[in-house]
Amino acid sequence: MKKVNLIKVNHNIKIGDVCGDIDPNITEDSIFYDNDEIVGFYIKSIEGKLKQYIDIANNELLSDRVPKSEMRRSSGLRNSESEVKQYSTIIGSCAAKPHMKRPYPMISSVHQVDSAKTYIKAMILACHQAEELVKELTPELFEKQEKIINEKVPPKFRFGRLFTSSIANFNIPAPFHRDAANLENCVNVIIAKKSFAKGGNTTVPDYNATVDSRDNSMLVYPAWRNVHGVTPIIPLKTGGYRNSLVFYPLKAFNNYWD
């Protein structure tokens, strides 16, 4: 794999700024280093059981069997009047939301929907395979994150060995933000499914790095660490889409040990 040294650059981007259409400059299998520390990696095409489980999960998500939070939004392009269908689905653990009169964490209600069982099972199996890939390629990241999860997350709130939760984002770009609710010193896994669409690339302005969100790619990165955004997703024909299947570790559960 290619070694990519992440070098800080100056920029004026702030949290909340719109993420424009940026072409990727990271397109090959790569391991990311910051001051000789491994912080993540990128694989342009997953294979084997991981791909099989992700394909099953993606097909289920595209069906009516999986509950979704739907919205209609702009494509994300400046000066564009085009509108695309967007939705997301969260499984695994959800943080408490006192402002919504739920002052306690819970397991996503999607787990109570019988028709979503195949999707959930496929995502859990994909999570296990992704974790094995992290362990194989960057054992230091795996060991550090497993230790943090074991110390900070009660077993009932874990999703796999390294995470608490999973979200699927369908056709959803993102303004620049930082995942401040995530456990520090941990990574996310982001797997992309794409069909007749361009964009949806993850860009990190601190390093002038934009990662290619090609079909079946996998990005492992500490989303708590840097401001980052997701570039606009542009369907190239009717029905074109980019879906991201994400595993992530929240820091909301340390006060809920049995």
Image (cartoon, rainbow, N blue to C red):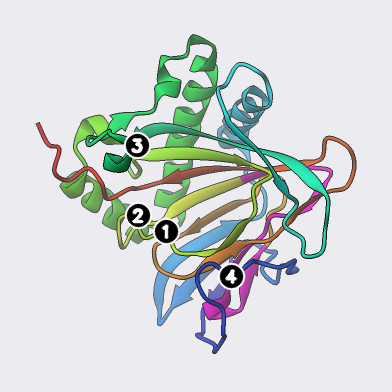
Segment colored magenta = 192-211
Q: Residues within 10 Å of mark 1 (few under 14, many from 20)?
A: some
Mark 3 surroundings: few (<14), some (14-19) or many (≥20) residues within 10 A? many
Q: Is residue 223 magenta?
A: no
**Residue plotted at (54% across, 12% down):** 115
Specify whether 47 is left or right of 119. Answer: right
Q: Which of marks 3 and 4 is nearer the N terminus?
A: 4
Tell me how many marks there are: 4
CA gap, disc 4 to disc 1?
15 Å
Of the numbered discs 4 and 1, the one sitting upstream in the chain is: 4
Q: Which of marks 3 and 1 is nearer the N terminus?
A: 3
For the residues bearing labels 4 and 1, Cβ distance under 8 angstroms: no
Q: Which residue bears the numbered disc 2?
A: 182
- Residue 211 is marked as none
Query: On the image, which quarter does residue 222 sit in?
Result: bottom left
- Which residue of the protein is positioned furthest toward the top in this rendering? 114
Q: Provide the secondary structure element on which disc 2 rests.
A: loop
Question: Does the stretch in magenta take in 204?
Answer: yes
